Image: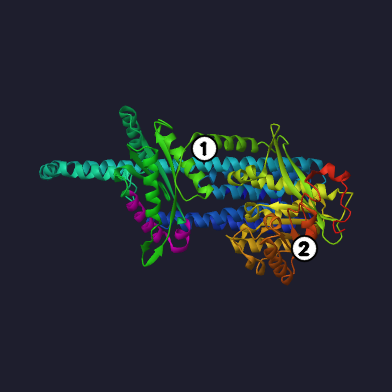
C-alpha cells in the first residue's frame, strides 16, 4: 500500500503540467481512496482474525482480489488517460513503475494463481499495446518489451503460484501427519485391551477360516475363468484348456475338433428387443450347445460367438455334431412370451492336422466360419488347404490394395451408355480396374475386400475425383454425363455430401453431368439415412440411378419412396429377354414411367437385344454390342461403329 501511495504521488505530481493538472489530481485522489479503503479492509481483517479464528476466509479473499484488480485498473487508466501528454521521460518512468509493480505482484500475489495472472496482464498489456501502435520508435520498442515482459510475468506468476500452492499443501499435510501421530499415540494405550479382545475373536473365527478360504477360491475361479452371463469358460480359460486337449491329442494320436460358432440374426434381436432379451437368448444358446459336449469344453468367445472342443472327433464326427448344433439353434427360442429364431454359422478346425497351437486353431476356425457365412451355405465348413490358400491370397490382395493408389495401379475405364432413339452417347459409366504387379484383379474380387477393410472410402473418393476430372475435359462430347458407382459404405458416411461438393468444385464439372449408381441392395438397411443422403444429392442436381434393379431385396416398392432418376435393368433379365425376362423388363418399364424414372438396360450384347429393348421403350442401352470399357485416352479416338442398330 505504501509503495502504491508513493508511486501514484510521483507520477501525479512529479510530471504535472497545466494541461493535465486537474485530471492527474482527480486520478491521484481516486487511487488514494482505493488504497485507503483496501488498507482499512486489511486492518479490519486482522482484527476479525484475532477475535474469531473461524472467520470466513473466502469472503476476505474476494475483497482482497477485487481491491487488487481495482488498483491495477487504476494504473491502467493512467496510461490511457495521459498517454498523449507524456514526454519521453514520463512515458519511460511510467513503464518502469508499472513493470516493477507487475514484477512485485507476481510474487506477492502468488497465493492466487489467477489473481497474479490478471494483475500482471491488466498492468502490462494496455501500455504495451499503446506503445506498439504509437508512431514513436522508442514507444514501439518499449511496447514490444512490455508484451514480452507480460508473457514472462504470466508464466512466472503461474509457476510461483504453483510452488506456493504446493508449499501450503505440504504444510497442511505435515500438520495432518502430526495430528495423526498424536492420535495414534493416544490410541496406543488401548491397543493391549483391544489385542486381547481380537485374540479371542480370532480364536473363534480361526476354525471357520478354511471353509471361507475354499469358498473364496471357488469364487475367484469363477470370476477369472467363467463367463459371467452364460457360466461357460471365458477366452482365457478355454484357450488354456484347448492347449491341454491338443497335447493329449498328440500323445494319444486321436484328433480334437474345434467348432467356432457365430449366431446369425442376434444383433437384430438385441437392437429391437433390448439387451435383457438378448442375454436370455445367449443363455439358452449356451445350454443347447452344452447338450452336445461337456460344459467344461464349451466357451463363450465374446458377443454372440461360442467355442466347442470335441476330443476324439475326426472330420466326419465334427461335421455331424456341428450340423446337429445348427438344427438345435434353429429351433424357436421363447423369451418373455416372444418366439425368436436364430441360425448359426460354424467353422471347424482340427488338431493336430491343421495346427498344434490353441490360438492358431481358434483363428483358423474363425476364418473358416467367416467364409462359410459369406458363402451363404447352411451347413458347417471344415478348414482346408484350399481355404487356406484362398485366405492367404485374399490377404495378399488386401495388402496390395492398401498401396494401390500410392503406386498408381488403379485406373478407370469408361463404357458408353447410348440413347436408344438417337444412338448417341448419353453417358459413360466409370469402371474401376486394378493392375496388381502386372496381373489384372477383377473388381468382383477387390471391391468386397476394400469394403470390408474400410479402404473403399479412400478408393471411392479417388474414383469420383478422377471421373469428374476426366469428364470435364472430354472435348469429343461436352454434354455427356459420367456415371460412377457408389458403395453403401460411402453413401452412409456423414462426410460424403461434403466430399461431393469439394470434388465438383475442384473439377469444375457441372453437377447435372454427374450420375451416381446405387446398388438396389443398399436400400435394405438404414433406409431413412439413405433417403436423407439421396435427397441432398438430388438437391445439388446430381442424378441417381438404381443399379441391378430387381436382383436385390428391396422390390419395386422402393421406387415409391426414394428420390431416384433412373432404373438400370440388370443384365440377367436382358440375357433372358426371350423368356421370363421380357415380362420383368416390361413391368419395370411400366412402374418406372408411372414414377417419372428413365430406364437403362445393361448387358446388351446383340443387335436383336438392342432392337427389342428399344421397341419396348427402354430409354438408354449399354453393353458390349456398342463398346467395351475403354481407357480415357481411347475415348478420344473412339467412334461408334454402329450407325443405327435399328436399320
Span highlighted in magenta in the image: 267-289
Residue 370 is one of the magenta-drawn residues? no
The residue singled out by tag 2 in the image is 618
Residue 274 higher or lower than 632, as above or below = below
The residue singled out by tag 1 in the image is 387
Q: Quadrant of residue 598?
A: bottom right
Closer-to-camera residue (629/98): 629
Closer-to-camera residue (296/618): 618
Q: Main secondary structure of the magenta part?
A: helix
Badge 2 marks a residue whose secondary structure is loop
Badge 1 marks a residue whose secondary structure is helix
Closer-to-camera residue (581/36): 581
Examine the rendering and report whether any part of residue 300 can be seen: no
Residue 454 lies left or right of residue 111; in this view the side is right
Q: Quadrant of the C terminus?
A: bottom right
Q: Earlier in the sequence, mark 2 or mark 1?
A: 1
Amino acid at each position: 500500500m505504501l509503495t502504491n501511495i508513493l508511486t501514484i504521488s510521483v507520477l501525479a505530481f512529479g510530471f504535472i503540467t497545466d494541461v493535465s493538472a486537474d485530471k492527474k489530481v482527480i486520478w491521484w485522489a481516486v487511487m488514494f481512496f482505493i488504497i485507503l479503503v483496501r488498507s482499512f479492509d486489511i486492518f479490519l481483517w486482522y482484527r476479525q482474525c484475532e477475535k474469531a479464528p473461524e472467520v470466513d476466509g473466502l469472503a476476505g479473499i474476494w475483497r482482497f482480489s477485487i481491491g487488487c484488480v481495482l488498483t491495477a485498473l487504476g494504473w491502467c487508466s493512467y496510461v490511457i488517460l495521459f498517454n498523449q501528454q507524456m514526454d519521453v521521460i514520463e512515458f519511460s518512468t511510467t513503464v518502469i513503475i508499472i513493470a516493477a509493480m507487475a514484477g512485485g505482484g507476481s510474487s506477492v500475489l502468488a497465493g492466487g494463481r489467477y489473481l497474479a495472472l490478471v494483475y500482471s496482464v491488466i498492468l502490462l498489456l494496455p501500455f504495451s499495446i499503446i506503445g506498439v501502435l504509437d508512431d514513436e520508435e522508442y514507444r514501439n520498442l518499449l511496447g514490444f518489451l512490455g508484451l514480452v515482459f507480460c508473457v514472462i510475468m504470466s508464466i512466472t506468476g503461474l509457476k510461483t503460484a504453483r510452488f506456493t500452492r504446493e508449499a501450503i499443501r505440504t504444510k497442511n499435510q505435515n500438520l495432518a501427519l502430526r495430528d495423526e501421530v498424536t492420535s495414534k499415540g493416544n490410541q496406543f494405550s488401548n491397543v493391549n485391551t483391544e489385542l486381547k479382545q481380537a485374540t479371542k475373536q480370532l480364536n473363534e473365527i480361526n476354525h471357520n477360516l478354511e471353509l471361507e478360504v475354499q469358498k473364496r477360491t471357488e469364487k475367484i475361479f469363477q470370476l477369472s475363468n467363467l463367463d459371467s452371463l452364460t457360466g461357460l469358460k471365458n477366452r482365457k480359460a478355454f484357450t488354456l484348456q484347448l492347449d491341454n486337449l491338443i497335447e493329449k491329442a498328440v500323445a494319444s494320436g486321436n484328433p480334437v475338433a474345434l467348432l467356432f460358432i457365430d449366431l446369425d440374426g442376434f444383433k437384430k434381436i438385441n437392437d429391437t428387443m433390448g439387451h435383457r432379451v438378448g442375454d436370455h437368448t445367449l443363455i439358452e444358446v449356451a445350454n443347447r450347445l452344452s447338450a452336445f459336449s461337456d460344459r467344461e469344453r464349451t466357451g463363450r468367445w465374446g458377443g454372440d460367438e461360442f467355442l466347442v472342443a470335441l476330443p476324439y472327433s475326426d472330420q466326419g464326427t465334427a461335421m455331424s455334431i456341428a450340423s446337429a448344433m445348427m438344427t438345435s439353434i434353429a429351433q424357436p427360442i421363447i423369451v418373455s412370451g416372444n418366439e425368436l429364431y436364430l441360425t448359426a454359422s460354424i467353422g471347424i478346425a482340427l488338431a493336430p492336422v491343421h495346427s498344434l497351437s490353441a490360438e492358431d486353431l481358434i483363428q483358423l476356425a474363425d476364418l473358416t466360419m467367416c467364409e462359410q457365412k459369406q458363402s451363404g451355405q447352411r451347413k458347417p465348413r471344415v478348414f482346408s488347404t484350399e481355404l487356406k490358400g484362398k485366405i492367404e491370397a485374399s490377404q495378399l490382395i488386401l495388402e496390395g490394395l492398401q498401396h494401390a493408389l500410392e503406386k498408381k495401379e488403379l485406373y478407370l475405364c469408361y463404357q458408353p451408355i447410348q440413347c436408344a432413339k438417337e444412338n448417341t452417347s448419353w453417358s459413360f459409366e466409370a469402371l474401376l480396374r486394378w493392375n496388381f504387379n502386372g496381373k489384372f484383379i477383377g473388381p468382383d474380387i477387390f471391391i468386397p475386400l476394400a469394403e470390408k477393410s474400410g479402404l473403399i472410402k479412400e478408393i471411392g473418393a479417388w474414383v469420383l475425383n478422377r471421373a469428374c476430372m476426366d469428364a470435364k475435359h472430354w472435348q469429343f462430347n461436352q454434354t455427356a454425363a459420367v456415371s460412377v458407382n457408389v458403395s453403401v459404405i460411402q453413401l452412409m458416411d456423414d462426410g460424403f455430401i461434403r466430399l461431393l461438393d469439394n470434388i465438383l468444385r475442384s473439377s469444375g464439372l457441372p453437377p447435372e453431368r454427374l450420375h451416381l449408381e446405387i446398388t438396389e441392395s443398399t436400400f435394405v438397411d438404414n433406409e431413412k439415412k439413405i433417403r436423407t443422403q439421396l435427397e441432398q444429392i438430388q438437391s445439388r442436381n446430381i442424378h441417381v440411378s438404381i443399379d441391378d434393379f430387381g436382383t436385390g431385396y428391396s422390390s419395386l416398392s422402393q421406387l415409391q419412396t426414394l428420390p431416384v432418376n433412373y432404373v438400370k435393368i440388370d443384365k440377367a433379365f436382358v440375357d433372358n429377354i426371350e423368356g421370363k425376362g421380357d415380362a420383368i423388363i416390361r413391368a419395370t418399364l411400366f412402374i418406372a414411367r408411372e414414377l417419372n424414372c428413365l430406364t437403362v438396360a445393361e448387358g446388351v450384347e446383340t443387335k436383336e437385344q438392342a432392337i427389342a429393348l428399344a421397341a419396348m421403350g427402354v430409354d438408354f442401352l449399354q453393353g458390349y454390342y456398342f463398346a467395351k470399357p475403354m481407357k480415357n485416352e481411347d475415348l478420344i479416338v473412339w467412334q461408334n461403329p454402329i450407325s443405327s442398330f435399328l436399320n
